[in-house]
Each structure stands twice: as structure tokens, then as C-alpha cells.
Image (tube, grey):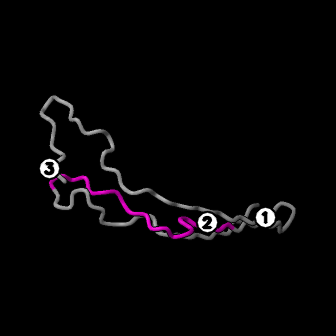
């Protein structure tokens, strides 16, 4: 309810605690897999696979904190979808 949040008078502190508008929890699992392969005595090839938000858990974004907005306190989006990246690195 936006009426519960009003601006404090000038020069005074309000009575709302810090971080009173909290969003839902954030569930995230990241993993990396790395394989090093020797090609020669002083040359190696590294393969790397990295996965962010491996289980693709839905994470909702923070609530709207603009008191003038009609969407105050609502959550209107998601954050951090699953991502994967692969890399080859030649070390010499």
C-alpha cells in the first residue's frame, strides 16, 4: 500500500526501517568444467565450459520503489536466465 510510505518532514528521519521493501530470494547455481591437455612440452590446450544459473531457476527482479508510480511495490520482471559459455585457450 503506497499510503504506508510517506516522505518524512524536512530535517527529520522517517520511521521506516532500512530495506523494508525486500524482493523474493535469489536461487542460483553456477558450475565450471575445465580440461587441460598437453600438446607439447611447453604447449597446452585448455577447454572450459561455464554454466550460470545451471538449473534455470526463475529469479524475480526487485519490487518497484517509485512511490509516485501506480506499480509501486509490484514485481514486473525476472533476472538472470540460464547462460552457458565455452572457451578454448592455447597456453604457450
Q: CA distance from mark 2 to mark 1?
A: 19 Å
Q: Earlier in the sequence, mark 2 or mark 3?
A: 3
Question: Which segment is the magenta one?
Answer: 48-68
Q: Earlier in the sequence, mark 2 or mark 1?
A: 1
Residue beneath disc 3: 3
What label does residue 50 carry, if any? 2
Numbered circles on residues, count: 3
Q: Quadrant of the rendered structure where residue 72 is?
A: bottom left
On-image quarter of the N terminus? bottom left
Residue 84 position within the rendered picture, expressed as x and y whole percent measured from the top left: 56, 70
On-image quarter of the C terminus? bottom right
What label does residue 8 carry, if any? none
Does the segment drawn in magenta span residue 80? no
**Which numbered disc, 1 or 3, marks the residue closer to the eye?**
3
Near-viewer residue (71 or 87): 71
Q: CA distance from mark 1 to mark 3?
A: 64 Å
CA neighbours of label 1 inside 10 A, class few (<14), some (14 to 19), many (20+):
some
Near-viewer residue (40 or 17): 17
Residue beneath disc 1: 44
At x 87%, y 62%, the residue is 41
SS at mark 2 in the image: strand
Near-viewer residue (36 or 32): 32
At x 67%, y 69%, the residue is 88
Q: Earlier in the sequence, mark 1 or mark 3?
A: 3
CA neighbours of label 2 inside 10 A, class few (<14), some (14 to 19), many (20+):
some
Residue 27 position within the rendered picture, expressed as x and y whole percent measured from the top left: 49, 60
Q: CA distance from mark 2 to mark 3?
A: 46 Å
Near-viewer residue (44 or 25): 25
Q: Residue furthest left?
A: 9
Residue 79 position within the rendered picture, expressed as x and y whole percent measured from the top left: 41, 64
**Which numbered disc, 2 or 1, marks the residue closer to the eye?**
2
**Which numbered disc, 2 or 3, marks the residue closer to the eye?**
3
Amino acid at each position: 500500500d503506497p499510503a504506508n510510505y510517506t516522505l518524512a518532514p524536512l530535517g527529520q528521519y522517517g520511521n521506516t526501517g532500512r530495506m523494508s521493501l525486500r524482493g523474493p530470494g535469489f536461487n542460483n547455481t553456477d558450475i565450471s568444467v575445465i580440461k587441460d591437455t598437453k600438446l607439447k612440452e611447453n604447449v597446452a590446450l585448455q577447454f572450459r565450459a561455464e554454466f550460470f544459473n545451471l538449473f534455470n531457476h526463475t529469479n524475480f527482479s526487485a519490487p518497484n520503489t517509485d512511490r509516485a508510480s501506480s506499480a509501486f511495490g509490484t514485481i514486473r520482471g525476472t533476472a538472470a536466465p540460464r547462460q552457458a559459455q565455452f572457451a578454448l585457450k592455447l597456453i604457450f
